[in-house]
Every structure is written in C-alpha cells, then in structure tokens.
Image (tube, coloured by chain):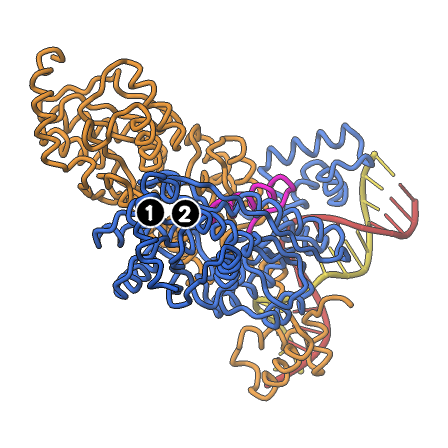
Chain colours: A blue, B orange, C red, D yellow
Amino acid sequence: MDRVTLKDVAAACGVSRATVSLVLQDSPRVSALTKERVREAMRRLGYVYDRRAANLRFRRSLTVALVTTDAHNSYFAEMTMAIECTLYRHGYTLLLGYSHDGKQRQEKLLNTMLEHRVDGVILVPSCETTAELVEQSLDAAGTPYVLVTRPLPGHAADYVGIDSVAAGGLIGEHLASRGHRRIAFLGGPSQATTRLEREQGLQSALAAHGVEFDPALSIATSADREGGARAAHLLLRTGEVPDAIVCYSDVVAFGVLAALRIAGIEPGTDVAVASFDDTPEARLQQPPLTSVSTHPGRTGTLAAELLLRRLEDPGHPSETVLLKPELHVRESTANLRLTREQSLRRVARGGAHR
Amino acid sequence: MDRVTLKDVAAACGVSRATVSLVLQDSPRVSALTKERVREAMRRLGYVYDRRAANLRFRRSLTVALVTTDAHNSYFAEMTMAIECTLYRHGYTLLLGYSHDGKQRQEKLLNTMLEHRVDGVILVPSCETTAELVEQSLDAAGTPYVLVTRPLPGHAADYVGIDSVAAGGLIGEHLASRGHRRIAFLGGPSQATTRLEREQGLQSALAAHGVEFDPALSIATSADREGGARAAHLLLRTGEVPDAIVCYSDVVAFGVLAALRIAGIEPGTDVAVASFDDTPEARLQQPPLTSVSTHPGRTGTLAAELLLRRLEDPGHPSETVLLKPELHVRESTANLRLTREQSLRRVARGGAHR
DNA sequence: CTGAAAGCGCTTACAG
DNA sequence: CTGAAAGCGCTTACAG
C-alpha cells in the first residue's frame, strides 16, 4: 500500500487535486460543503501532508538549522530550548547539529543543512571559525543566518550575545572593591573571543582600582570540568594561592572547586571563587557560587526572533544585540568573616607583590 | 539571481541533467573527464544540492526526528547529544522538538515531523501518552520509531530504557542494609511509569529486609528542582524526619537538599539522601550524592542504532533493551560515623514505627 | 558513455 | 466555485 497523496484524496471525493490543495490552505475559494467532504476523505484515508513537495514549489521549507558546539553546558541546553520554543510558536521546525567545537564538523553540518534547504541558520561558531568561512558557506548560499554567543570579529551579521567585556568588568569591580589583589583567571580555550573579552574586562576593572592583573595567573584550558581541575592544578603548582579565582564558566568552576578541596584549600574560606554563566547549579554549590548571568534563554529567544525577522525582511540592516550581564554575589565571594581574615593575609603579603 | 540547479550546471558544461545527477552520485557510468568538468562547474557556479527534490523522488529524507520532553535535565541533554552523534555518523540529520511533557504539543510535533517526511522518529513519550495515541500517529503513518526512557505499557515497539525496578531495588537494598527503616520517596510525576517502577523496586528491596515502605512518605511532584523543594516541604510538614530520602532524580534531589538545609536539616548527617541519574552534578554536591546511573549516553546511542536498523530492515522483530543501572555510593549515604549515630536514634525510635 | 522522458507530491496562475 | 496544465529540482529506467 503506497502513501496517500492529494490525488487519492481528490479521486475519493471526485474533485481535482487543485481543489484539495486549496482546502488544505483553507482557501475562501472553495465551498464549505466541498471542504467538509474533502477533509472527511483525508481523515478516512489517513492522508499526511507532504511538506517536502509543497516546499519544493513554495520555496520555503519552514525549517531552521541550529549548529552549536554541544549540550554538556547547561547554558547551551537552555539556549537551544529557547530557540526551539520560539521557532515552534512561529511554525518552524528545528534541525540540530553539534559541531563539538570542531571546524570540519561544523562545515559538514552547515553544508548538510543548506542541502536540506533550511530557511535560515543559527550558528554558534566553533573555535577556529573565521569570517571568511562563514561567508563562503552561508553568505554564498544566500541563506539568512544569525550568529550567537561567540562574536566573529570583522563580520557584519546579526549577532546576539552577552557583553563579555562588561561581564568580566563586573567580577573585577566586585573583587577589587573587596580588597582582593592577586587574582587568577582559570579555564576556557585561549583562542576563544569570549575568554579574551572577559579577561580584558576583568583587567580593566582591576586597573581602575589600581590592581595589576598578572598574566601568569591566566591559565587557559578546555571549557569543561576537567579543564577547570587542570587549570587549578597548574595554578597551585606555582606554590601560590591567590586571593581570588575567576573561572571561565560555572562548569569550569565545578572542576576548580573539586581540585581546590583535594588540595586542602577551602573555596570561599581560603580563596574567593567567582565565575560566569549563573547556571542553576551555581546556586547549589557549597558555598553557593558568585556568578555572572549570561542569559541563555533570553539569548536563544532573541536569536530566533532576529532570524525570523530577517526571513521576513531579507534587506533589514544587520543588528548586534549585546545583553547586559548581571552579577549575582553569593557566599563564594561574600563571606565577610572570611574576607576579613583574608584581608590580613593580604596586607601582610602586600609588599611582596608590588 | 535564482538558485543554481542541475540544469544550470548541465548547460554550463554542455551535458544533460541526467549526467550531472550521475556525477553527484559518483556513478561509474560517467567518464572521469566529464566528472571533473561537471564538478568544476558546480564549484564555479556555487551549486548546492537540493535534498528535498532528491528525496521526493528517492523516497528517503535522511532525517530522523527526536521528540523529547525538554533539556533542563542533563540526562536528556546527554541523550540528545548521543543520538545526534550516532545519526550524524550515518549521514542522517536530526529534527528536534520539545514537548515540554505536554500531550498536545507532542501530538503537534509528531504531526509536523511526519509532514516533513522524516524517515524515523525517536520518541520520549510525554506524561499522558497512551499506546493508542502512538498507534494513531506513528503506526498509522507507517513511520518507523523507537521509544526511549519511558516505556509504554502494552505496546510492542522498539524500546530503550533503564530497568527502573532494578534501579529502585539497588537503592532500597543499599539503604536497608545500612539499617535505614523510615524511607521517603520524593518528587516525580505520579503518573510516570518510571516513578511507579522505581518505587516498586524500592519497596520490594526494603521488604526483602523486613522493612515496610510507608506510602504516606511517597510524595509525587514535578520532576524538577522546585518539585523537589515542594516535596521536601510537604514531608517536613508532617513533623517527621525520615532516616533516608530517595529522590526521583538528581535534579529533584538538588531541590530537596536546598529545602532540607533551609529547614536546618543537614543532608548526609541528619538524613541520608540518594537519587537517580548520576549526573556529573551529583558528584559535585556537598555532600556528594549517592545516585544510580541511568546511562543517558548509552541509551541515546542504542536508540539511534535500533532505529537505523529498523530503517534498513522494517520487518525486524521489535526489541526492548533494558540497561542495567549502577549504584554509585557517595557521602550522602555513606558517612559511617553519621550512620552509627543515626542507628542509635533509629533504634530508640524503632518501636514507635512498627 | 550520454541523453530524452517520465514522475516524485505539491502549488499556482489561468480558464471557464 | 472548480479543473487542466505547467513547474519546483531532482532520479531512474530506457534507449542509443
């Protein structure tokens, strides 16, 4: 038994395929009676609309591709859900691919998505993605797209992300104003724009308080738990415990916390710890983790909305949306009793550092 | 400028569309010289293969739909990644939809996926999904599918999940053997098969140790952090702190831990806490959480493999794969010093309970 | 080794 | 209000 098509439905009610097609679109040009008869036949025969065929004519597929790095990080999971939700509400279906932060895999995925004739693409650029790469694939194919989370320097396209410099600044300001002077920045891939920007913001804010950021305390690793643990090890190997540790992300921080404890250093007591993302898990740590919210849900929603607008109006000038980060101070940096003790140590050590 | 099609490429090299199509498939029927010429032209013109059109003829779309509940839970995030990875390796692209555990939304999503003519579907059935519902949509359309994570009683289809009864049994056995007698089961939707099975396994294992499970201590809520907190409140309102709390999932446990602390009850010290999923976050709690691994990655990979096999061989008898759970004992239940103290209390209270 | 023709399932002007 | 015809971009026998 073959699949039921428009032709079968048409034959079953003695009308033409054109009429059935019009019923499908609920066109006012078809009488109510005919509509009812056709619809009844569709139900009876178990007809399922074939969008591929329709889209071939129609030149729209009502699909959007999301190519992202992975979903281990709950930031990306949140963002993905928000994107799907927004697309769903507008009748679009999501095609999803994980690049695993690999350039080659990303290229293959983008190509496949284009072959599937998605109407648009939302891309979290993998680590080594360059502006040329995107131009050669997406722009060349004339497929609208939005970049998310990681900016691509020197590239004019719709972009949604967090203001990473400001995010770094928030933490720097917070730590410096509490008197911390020796501050490490742990984890995250060294090439990542996000990392560079956060560090830059951190550094500027510290400088504004007369605190110099020591590049030797910036240790780049992968942006996962293992990376955090590794960075913490490398830091401790220098024999120095800084006043505060800023982690590239909450996930990195989890690894850092574990490594510190193994080394007998109590986070929040012996050293302040702060990070980026403000995942739900950050709140649940012991001590609860000071973290800068990067608004994954809002980012996803905005990205989808920006893309949908561009689909409607391809000529719309490209737009960059930078969300404002928010600092959430928790016990990992806010325990006053402890910071007072630390202040003493800090003062005692002060001369050696400057 | 219109999109470049086979026709344009054919015209550019003075061959027919058929020949270009054969080059695309690297058919041995075309000479090497012609192939090179055609490929060069495709590059030069920026030709992008249109799978929709190809599939319309070919009757395969090389796409698979995943309809799952959400991705807040890192269990589902892991599973989704494993599915995407396996599909990618076999040349399939993933269409993704989140039902948010809603029956209606799931139905709409499934319908859309069928309209997109996916070759197969991987479904995490939403809460109220019945066997009939699945039969009316997926079976009626003749689209192969695999059920994941949540079984559908009385339904013969490919299924991959964890043996939830065994999982509950592992925790029951562990807690009973440590002398715990009053044991609560918190969180998770009451209708969920998974919940029923875990509770059943828990109850049986306790019974084997002569411990009776009190249904009054089984409190169903949503399967998220808030649900956990709510369940803990309801439990504490009875005025009793049980010996141990079994949580429906790690995420629920995070809510329970927070609520206990707010109430001045220290998890691991005043009450043992265990849960299901063994997410990376469980290890990172204070105290580290005893949890039963439910193998999300393995589940996803197997589900995709089962579906791919069925796509190749539609007549293959349907198969149920039940993964064996694994108990990971950590400090939340394993702190011996504490359990000894608790034993005393327990003994002192023993008479009152039985 | 290559081409002309039919067809996948739909939609869209154009007639009537 | 409804139908006949062309066409979306590809593939697949069938000829030559």
> Which three-letter amino acid code belongs to the residue tagged 1?
Pro
Residue nearest the observer in this picture, B133 or B227: B227
Mark 2 highlights which residue? B77
> Which three-letter amino acid code belongs to the residue tagged 2?
Ala
Which residues lie in the magenta part?
Answer: A74-94
Residue B51 left/right relative to A222: right
Q: Which label's residue is closer to the chain start, 2 or 1?
A: 2
Mark 1 highlights which residue? B296
Residue A244 left/right relative to B110: left
Look at the picture and state if B263 lies above or below B150: above
The percent coordinates of residue B58 (x first, y second) are 56, 60
Q: Secondary structure at mark 2?
A: helix
Chief SS of the magenta region: helix
- Cα separation, mark 2 vs mark 1, equals 8 Å
The percent coordinates of residue A352 (x first, y second) are 33, 63
Residue B250 left/right relative to A38: left
Dots 2, 1 in contact, CB < 8 A? yes
Q: Is residue B117 visible?
A: yes
Q: Nearer the viewer, mark 2 or mark 1?
A: 2
